Amino acid sequence: MRGLDERSEGLFSYVSCEARVPANHPLRAIRAIVDEALEVMSPAFEGLYSKIGRPSIPPEKLLRALLLQAFYSVRSERQLMEQLDYNLLFRWFVGLSMDAPVWDVTVFTKNRERLLAGDVAAKFLATVLGQPKVKTLLSDEHFSVDGTLIEAWASVKSFRPKDGGGEPPGPGRNGDRDFHGERRSNETHASTSDPEARLYRKGNGQPAKLAFMGHALMENRHALVVNVRLTAATGLAEREAAVSMIEAIPGRHRITVGADKAYDTKDFVADMRDLGVAPHVARNTSNRRSAIDGRTTRHPGYAVSLRVRKRIEEVFGWIKGAGLRKTRHRGAARVGWMFTLTAAAYNLIRLPKLLAAA
């Protein structure tokens, strides 16, 4: 018999968010890893907050909410607060009860700034990787490095002369601006929306965009991100950031680093060998001589590194799909903080299956 379309609003409810989440839901394993890392970071949170005054948003809940934003590609903090209001799965993961009020979006973003000042994203990434069960998954000998462009939250029309001259855009909300015949460079121009963003062109025939450059260091065993950097978009940024991240690898044992043709320069290869690193860099022989010679290519591990290092593109693809193809934030500090936290979210997505297989 057909059921009737009737609504019965109960006066009381005794069902918790915990009961609504399936026992085999992927977020259960992720939350266990996150909670363990946040417990280790609790002393670091203490130093960011005053002992007096009104209680703020707990940093643990704030970080869990930001991780959900990356997991589900929520476009803004305002939409994230809307989801927390009615999505029981989100409430359970963050740690809110069924009837707990949701924070105002301006309060949420203000509290996020406190975590930015404490460099919490980098500490969270390191704490997750430092867990004993996770540490056994990581390779300490073979790595890959690469960089990608992150489009800034600024229009090319905001790229104006630093001396205040130049023709302003036309009237209206999105006025026209003709740039033909005008010479513009990062030395003479800057964005009025985000002065730290730089105009950068990825290659010949590609459009120039205001952007930052994100860099990642990946271990080759399970393709997990072990270090990240965010820099200004320049022609040397990829190699300089790679040297910085490789220097931060603990220990002085022999390691290998795979990279694409952009890293095939004499200076970078020399820097790697000075650090005791085998530069497994793809050879660039287009109208030039490669800096990689037979000392490197004769080893069978060289071909393996070139094949595995392509997996770092999966990292950048996931990070951009999580909301960083065009950043929603302004300033290198904020964009870099979100880039680091999103890289940690990528690791968390992959860790449950890797731990189960191990």
Image (spheres, rainbow, N blue to C red):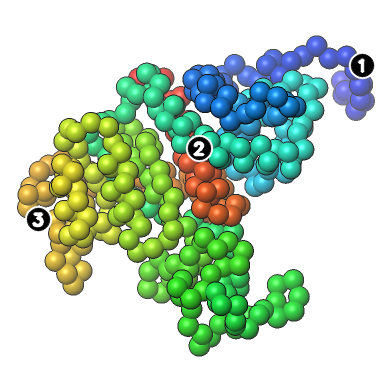
Residue 72: percent from the left, percent from the top? 60, 39
Q: Foreground residue, 142 or 181?
A: 181
Task: Find the distance from the CA under tag 2 to the CA under tag 3.
Answer: 41 Å
Residue 276: percent from the left, percent from the top? 15, 41
Query: Image point 77% across, 38% down: which residue?
Result: 104
* Disc 3 element: loop
Foreground tag (3 vs 1): 3
Q: What residue type is labelled 3?
A: Asp
Image position of 205 (left or right of 2)? left
Mark identifier at residue 239:
none
Mark identifier at residue 293:
3
Query: Image point 55% across, 74% down: which residue?
Result: 162
Is residue 174 visible in the rendered structure shown here? Answer: yes
Q: What residue type is labelled 2?
A: Asp
**Splitting the image into 4 quarters, where does residue 3 fall?**
top right
* Vertical position of residue 18 compared to residue 101: above or below: above
Image position of 285 (left or right of 113)? left
* Disc 1 element: loop
**Splitting the image into 4 quarters, where does residue 106 fall?**
top right
The quadrant the C terminus occupies is top left
Image position of 204 (left or right of 309)? right
> Closer to the N terminus: mark 1 or mark 2?
1
Q: Which amino acid does label 1 sit on?
A: Leu
Query: Which residue corresponds to mark 1?
Result: 11
Foreground tag (1 vs 2): 2
Q: Residues within 10 Å of mark 1 (few under 14, many from 20)?
A: few
Residue 354: percent from the left, percent from the top? 39, 25
**Splitting the image into 4 quarters, where does residue 25 fall?**
top right
Task: Find the distance from the CA under tag 3 to the CA under tag 1.
Answer: 76 Å
